[in-house]
Image (tube, rainbow, N blue to C red):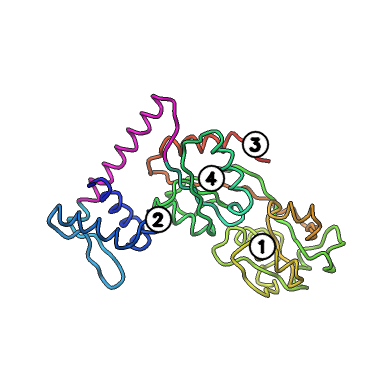
Amino acid sequence: MLNDSIRVFLMVVEKKSFSKAAKALFLTQPAVSFQIQMLEEHYGTRLFDRVSRNIILTEAGELLYKYATEMSDMQSSLEKDMQELNNTILGRLKVGASTTIGEYIAPYILGNFKKHYPKVTLSLEVANSDEIEMAIHDTSLDIGLVEGPPVDKDLESVPFLDDELVVITSVDHPWSKLESISVFELDQYPYISREKGSGTRAEIEQHLKMAGFSANNLNVMMKLGSTYAIKAAVRNGYGFTIVSRWAIKDDLRMGNLAMVKLKEDEFKRRFRIVYHKKKFKTQAAEEFLKFIESETFQ
């Protein structure tokens, strides 16, 4: 019973919130509060100070967190060694993916991994690249799949898949019948952009800058947080956009969208695997890294 309370305690510290911890553990908030109360009664001291809407560890909480973290790492190490001894990979693996990868590529990768390791319990969180990096940093996710190199110095990254950014329009757009256009023509029609924090948006802005065209010159009509939503807006004639070629494979085959090349350069990039340098990697996490680096997903 105490082990359950320790697990809840670590999640509350990790998420800095009772409600977020409850969501991550698939518990109610009262259940989380009850587990923390049990720990406080067991040790006869308060573990958290509640200041405004923030929760801060007390001195006793800091001490418990130190030992609880060591206990968790030792248990993970034991499970890893046992799995290696029995030649069986199991456990939980929490993967995060930036929007484009999460919508179009990650389900394929995780599905294939599950076929090889059926006893691993997988979960996938989809958000923009900045949010995935933050979740890897605070260790609420084991591994991230993102669209560019991480900014955080505590994160390690390895490229795993090539991509190309392309202009897409509706099938009746003036550009739809053209083979290519210049980046200096991109200010002629309304543009639909991803939100701030998007890895795709950051890559687009960088490539445009390298080609001599400022992203500030784009005639941004709207900003949307989903590639699905952006494609729907483009299909309905609200403007053009630039997206991953992976995101439009089915649309091009069905004739729902048109793709246009840019004359100046091919906007190439590489998707990357991201993980925390200092976080203990379970056997499931290590096998996933080996799996994704060895597979030829193209």
Task: From the top left corner, tell me how far across and down residue 141 is, in percent.
Answer: 44, 50
Q: Determine whether the residue tagged by mark 3 lies in a helix, strand or loop.
A: loop
The span picked out in magenta is 64-91
| Type of the residue with mark 3 | Thr
Q: Which residue is mark 3?
A: 296
Label of residue 209 in the image = 1
Q: Earlier in the sequence, mark 1 or mark 2?
A: 2
Quarter the C terminus occupies: top right
- Nearer to us: label 1 or label 2: 2
| Left or right of 78 in this view: 267 | right
- Nearer to us: label 3 or label 4: 3
Q: Earlier in the sequence, mark 4 or mark 2?
A: 2
Whether the magenta-drawn stretch holds residue 193 is answered as no
For residue 60, what is the image quadrant? Answer: bottom left
- Nearer to us: label 3 or label 2: 2
Distance between mark 1 and mark 2 Cα atoms:
40 Å
In this view, 15 is above or below 52: above
Distance between mark 3 and mark 2 Cα atoms:
32 Å
| Type of the residue with mark 2 | Ala
Distance between mark 4 and mark 2 Cα atoms:
22 Å
Q: Main secondary structure of the magenta part?
A: helix
Distance between mark 3 and mark 1 Cα atoms:
31 Å
Distance between mark 1 and mark 4 Cα atoms:
25 Å
Q: Which residue is mark 4?
A: 273
Q: Earlier in the sequence, mark 3 or mark 2?
A: 2
- Nearer to us: label 4 or label 2: 2
Which residue occupies the foreground of this view, 44 or 295?
44
For residue 114, what is the image quadrant? Answer: top right
Total numbered labels placed on residues in the image: 4
